[in-house]
Image: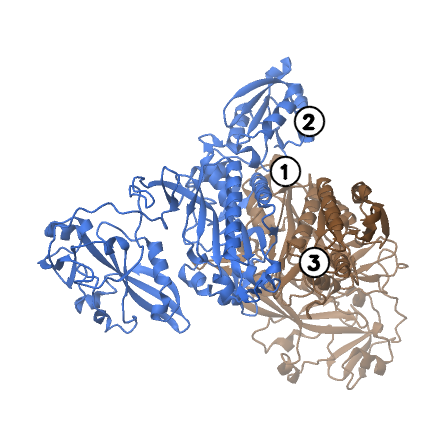
Chain colours: A blue, B brown
Amino acid sequence: MSQGLFPTWREAPADAETRGTVMLLRAGYVRKLGSGLYANLPLMQRTLQKLEALIRQELEGLGQEVSFPVLQPEQLWQESGRWAAYTQAESIMFTVRDRGGRQLALGPTHEEVAVVTVRDLIRSYRDLPLSVYQIGRKFRDELRPRFGLLRTREFTMKDGYSFHASPEDLHAHFEATADAYGRLLRRLGVEWRSVEADSGHIGGAESREFMVLSAVGEDEVLWTADGRYAANAERAVAGSVDVTPSPFVQRQRQHTPGAGTVAAACTLLGCKSAHMVKNLLYDAVVARSDGSLRVPVLVSLRGDHSVNPTKLWNAVQTRSRTWGGGTLISLDTAHSESWAQDQAAGLPLGYVGPDLPDTVLARRADVFPAFLRLCDGGAAALRNFATGANEPDWHLSGVNWGVDLACPEVTDLRQAQAGDPAVHDPAQMLQSARGIEVGHVFQLGTRYTTAMNATFAAADGTTQPLQMGCFGIGVTRLAQAIAEQLSDARGLVWPTCIAPYEVVLTIVDMSHAGQLAAATTLYGQLRAAGIDVLLDDRPVRAGAKFADADLLGVPYRVTLGRRLEGGEVEVHCRRSGEVRRLTLDNVVADLRVRLETPLA
Amino acid sequence: MSQGLFPTWREAPADAETRGTVMLLRAGYVRKLGSGLYANLPLMQRTLQKLEALIRQELEGLGQEVSFPVLQPEQLWQESGRWAAYTQAESIMFTVRDRGGRQLALGPTHEEVAVVTVRDLIRSYRDLPLSVYQIGRKFRDELRPRFGLLRTREFTMKDGYSFHASPEDLHAHFEATADAYGRLLRRLGVEWRSVEADSGHIGGAESREFMVLSAVGEDEVLWTADGRYAANAERAVAGSVDVTPSPFVQRQRQHTPGAGTVAAACTLLGCKSAHMVKNLLYDAVVARSDGSLRVPVLVSLRGDHSVNPTKLWNAVQTRSRTWGGGTLISLDTAHSESWAQDQAAGLPLGYVGPDLPDTVLARRADVFPAFLRLCDGGAAALRNFATGANEPDWHLSGVNWGVDLACPEVTDLRQAQAGDPAVHDPAQMLQSARGIEVGHVFQLGTRYTTAMNATFAAADGTTQPLQMGCFGIGVTRLAQAIAEQLSDARGLVWPTCIAPYEVVLTIVDMSHAGQLAAATTLYGQLRAAGIDVLLDDRPVRAGAKFADADLLGVPYRVTLGRRLEGGEVEVHCRRSGEVRRLTLDNVVADLRVRLETPLA
């Protein structure tokens, strides 16, 4: 330690937001270089390399390792149709122009590259399945880099891509990969969940996320105690809490002045919010080759429910044919300012009904002239409900779908919440936990291969698009997620399998020749035994060395101090806190056994 | 092989310019994704990982591994003063703007990041020396990506940075690292040279390059047979071939109509080109904070010598104080067009003398008003020479420095060539070879640490800038350089230590159950023995398998064919071509011995 780069600090920088970040900074694992940019110092590099080695082990037999360029020609993303989504929608993709003026993406993900790489190599079903993965840098122009390594602009990912002749084969590989991820997380000894997930911009059908549970996680996981359901809240579905019968028995126009909110209307109407259908206006902005277009969206929802923005985004994007195609760029609740002229012209904000006529849009040249109307299942199930009358200060009550007004297209748009009943068993209540997404597996199907014309000759002689899967682990993020969960007030508590060093030898008194000699001998013996050992030979007091050993999270500390006169050392276990005395000649054998039966 | 990604081709794409490129493409090691962008397929990934492991082994004890971000805030490069040189001079640096409009470099090199990372960690001489290295992606916006992996826009590099308390300690580390590079190249079994090198944009004092010799190398190496001198031609110095005594005995003005070239003038004057001083005009463009400036440069050179552009660039840049500082952006021979107006006004192109008056510049508002005058040592040594008379159609002969005209500042500007005598021993003649630069070690001194204020408290209590070194290996380029040198008409011939697989088992007849069974058993035995083995179980004819084994460059091929009936297999050595028959039960032991005593 006296010769290498092992800086430690008593305090972390003020902007370190989480315990994991604080400890990784204080223990000298990483240094911040700029917003969302970190240098990995030697300790972090060792931990990441061990983590990568574990990942390679668990993926053995599931694919071959490759390495794709970070720089990706724009043309590939135009082929897949994702250029607009990634450069405009969230604009999370860094792009660079070369000296010839051509644009290149700094890869946030590599589906396109994987497809073009294999599409000329796969001719027939005999070449399938084919699976490759890489471990390398990814880039995202994050809106708000934060939480240390959890949300950075540059990070290391394991990303794998597989190609299959059939959905069944894809599904089997998907499950095998998910099993491998589970094995990895079990070896790491963290508390985790695999959950149903939204596929986001990656697209495709089924996807599953792997969450390391942590209070600082940006994701909410909803799960049931019976173990039969777990989903990202972005995706989770819930049963409805039963509604008491509606107090309304027949259709009636009711004067509700100044009651433009659900709560106010319920008070005036004498009903519960669950008896109402609320109708929300959204502005969708869509990028098309001929420019951008605003599409008005009208969402009908039970009064006590709220909209799940992810579900709504997906519902709108998948209906792009309605207005002639294009990529959804933004989807925001319609601001009253942007509709002010319409309000003046009669748009009944606060009193909108599901049947708000398209004619309110007629004056707006920049807006698609018809609402995309969507209704959540909870609202669609209501009878004798109340809703806006499309006239300021007036509601309708006792209304029924199909009788008094047409029901819009029904789809699940609702945000499930802790406390909601589960769909599979209403007796199970959804519970909430925070999670850090460290892995995500996707059954993409033919979403990319069709767009990019990656086909194969099937056994029956037909030409078919390849079935594709993709599989990611956020390596840097996983390391910090472990640091978040496996740390205490004194520092990091690494699982043995990814600790940068397995053992630290602490010399109590550097001026004591016997201690120094015994430590040097033991250091050589442990190295010869294949144990990753660190020698704390710094000229600082023993208390500082003990504190640093705890901070660094080295699983075992061997203290060479006064007990050496009796031929003994102390072996301290970081995780359990247990301290044992051993004679010097037993140390190597003892540690070898303990390290071969790791705590985690 | 039937289950993985092992594509081979009979032909390489038409744009593959070198044998190494052809073989790496044909053998399925890499796929081209775009200009200067390649995907590493599984075979390449294995070779690169083995090469990286060798590099780590040889660097053991010379530094700790770290990993810096690819993205580097512009501010760092402004601090070191390199932003202009890298974004304008060669504009080889990709830059990207984040969503906040801030510029980031895609690191072509990491000196700045290394300095800012360590400058807060090093306080005193007790913290020194400190040495770190990383292996990762680098980016260059090449003017002309070419030669496969030799000149790409994205590549893998090992780059190391060391910090020292004294130039002596830096020098010792420099030599130790150079030794490690030498050991690496010897293990790889390639023919190589370490040569004196120009430090280019990296800066600093002494630097040395490691060249793998190859006809496709972009660099020229000049060396002597006695082994005492080797240098990049950009940097090489040479003695002069002796000049016969000048035919001119006294200063004379001679009419030389239409003799604006050295050759024509010599004919008219009756002398050799070595008796003349030629004077060349250059336009230097310099970037300064207040805009760009053109600086006229006048170079005097012996008539039979030519200018070394690298030496001239360095000579001009280091004299930037002459015109008030700034970064040299371009340096071109003055085009006649750009000087046409001057010529009309009396600039005697073709008849310029070393004493061309600055008054010829007076009319040009955009040009610094005085020539930077430089004279090569060869020209400075002449006596009674001929040169331009600063008047069209007239030369002066029998001229002497100090008598007839003032000698400009003397510096080495000459391009050394094969056939020139060596400086250290004129009996040694410089010889020329082409080389691929695979490594470069620099003694940077305080060039970065002074600019970036990275200091330490020395033992004598003073504050001093850190002494810095940097050390690079082009990992991807080294792999291809090996492929260039170690390949033949049939394919690659990898050294055992970086071959993707050490052994390939070739099943001659896939329909023969005995061959298949024996191969499967042997495959398991070789794997159990820790040997990297590939099983060629593809349903293709034996000839194609043999050809592919040669193309892939696997060091040993074990053929399981008809001889199995007698219990025998054939073991073929790719490099020597030797074929031996072995009984099946001897194969593992035999290969183990051969692989432990590698050919290279």
**Nearest the eye: B93 or B259:** B93
Task: Name the side, left or right, on which A269 lies relative to A379.
Answer: left
Q: Can you give x and y, in whole percent of width and height, for residue A456 in the image? A: 57, 64
- Of all chains, the one bearing label 2 is A
Q: Residue furthest top?
A: A566
Report the amino acid beneath label 1: Leu
Q: Is A118 situated above or below B169?
A: below
Q: Describe the element under mark 1 as helix, strand or loop.
A: loop
The amino acid on which the numbered mark 2 sits, given as a three-letter code, is Gln
- The answer to which of A512 and A499 lies nearer the viewer is A499
* Few, some or many residues within 10 Å of mark 3 (<14, 14–19, 20+): few
Q: Return the mark for residue B128.
A: 1
Q: Residue at x 76, y 78 (%)?
A: B388
Disc 1 to disc 2: CB gap under 8 Å = no
Identify the residue position indicated by label 2 in the image: A525
Q: Residue furthest left?
A: A255
Q: Which residue is mark 3?
A: B539
- Per the model, the C-alpha gap separating discs 3 and 1 is 60 Å
Disc 2: CA contacts within 10 A as few (<14), some (14-19) or many (>=20): some
Say which of marks 2 and 3 sits in front.
Answer: 3
x, y (%) of residue A151? Answer: 45, 48
Up/down of B511 relative to A225, above or below: below
Q: Alpha-carbon distance for marks 2 and 3? A: 51 Å
Residue A147 image-quadrant placement: top left
Classify B283 as above or below A215: below
Secondary structure of the residue carrying numbered label 2 = helix
Q: Residue at x 57, y 68 (%)?
A: A99
Dot 3 and dot 1 residues touching (CB under 8 Å): no
**Which x, y percent locates residue B372?**
67, 68
Q: Is residue B202 left or right of residue A468?
A: right
Residue B75 appears in the rendering: no
> What number is the disc on residue A44?
none
